[in-house]
Amino acid sequence: MPKASNIVRFKVNQDNQEKFENFFENRDRYEGEFLRTVVKTSEDRYCVFGIWVDEEAMVAARPEMIIFLDTIRHLLSEISPELGVTDPVSGEVLFLDGIDWRSGTLHEYVTELPDVDYNEPPEWND
């Protein structure tokens, strides 16, 4: 079953960047969430993307993600009238670390597979 990914852009209110970052840093992964990355793209803009074991897990976690969003909504600015305070997209993961998830083949720039089980979330040593 293919992995899924969700990507959400945020614009954070002035002087709330640290609070926003802390909310994500201290958040546990959702059931089925393989990996979460928070990227600061400018002083007040962020992009958060997650990789999920499959689309069903991502869809099942949406109610929890909305509840979490409600806890940080006061930290966010409107991106645009059409989008509101978030710009979310999601879809199937096609490539990850040189592996084509559709066929299981390696890209030519990958000389060897890293010692990672891509079917299990990474374990981080603090």
Image (cartoon, rainbow, N blue to C red):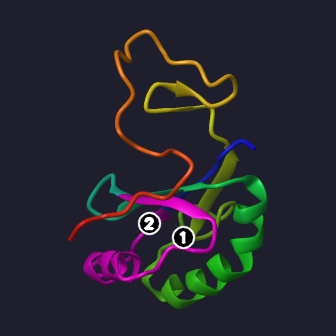
Occupied quadrant, residue 75: bottom left
Q: Which numbered mark, 1 or 2, is in the foreground of this view?
A: 2
The residue at 75%/54% (across/down) is: 55
What stretch of residues is rendered in magenta?
10-38
**Could you say where residue 119 lies in the image, as x and y percent from the top left?**
57, 49
Quarter of the figure with the N terminus: top right
Other-residue count near label 2 (Cα within 10 Å), few / some / many at <14 / 14–19 / ≥20: many
The residue lying furthest to the left in this view is 126
Q: Residues within 10 Å of mark 1 (few under 14, many from 20)?
A: some
Tell me the distance, in whole angstroms, between the alpha carbons under discs 1 and 2: 7 Å
Judge from the rendering whether residue 7 lies leftward or rightward of residue 113; answer left or right.
Answer: right
Residue 91 position within the rendered picture, expressed as x and y whole percent measured from the top left: 70, 45
Residue 55: mark in rendering: none
Using the image, tell me which numbered label, if any, was put on residue 11.
2
Is 122 covered by the magenta stretch? no
Q: Locate the C terminus by quadrant.
A: bottom left
Residue positioned 40% across, 72% down in the render? 12
| Residue 23, above or below 123 | below
Residue at x 32%, y 75% (from the top left corner): 21
Which of these two is toward me, 36 or 22? Answer: 36
Q: Earlier in the sequence, mark 1 or mark 2?
A: 2
Q: Are marks 1 and 2 in contact (CB under 8 Å)?
A: yes
Q: Quadrant of residue 25?
A: bottom left
What kind of element bears circle 1? loop
Where residue 111 appears, as percent x and y from the top left, is 34, 15
Q: Is residue 49 left or right of residue 55?
A: left
Q: Residue furthest top?
A: 108
Q: Which mark is residue 78?
A: 1
Residue at x 51%, y 44% (from the top left corner) = 118
* Residue kind at label 1, given as amino acid type: Glu
In the rendered view, tell whether residue 63 sits above or below residue 83: below
Provide the secondary structure element on which disc 2 rests: strand
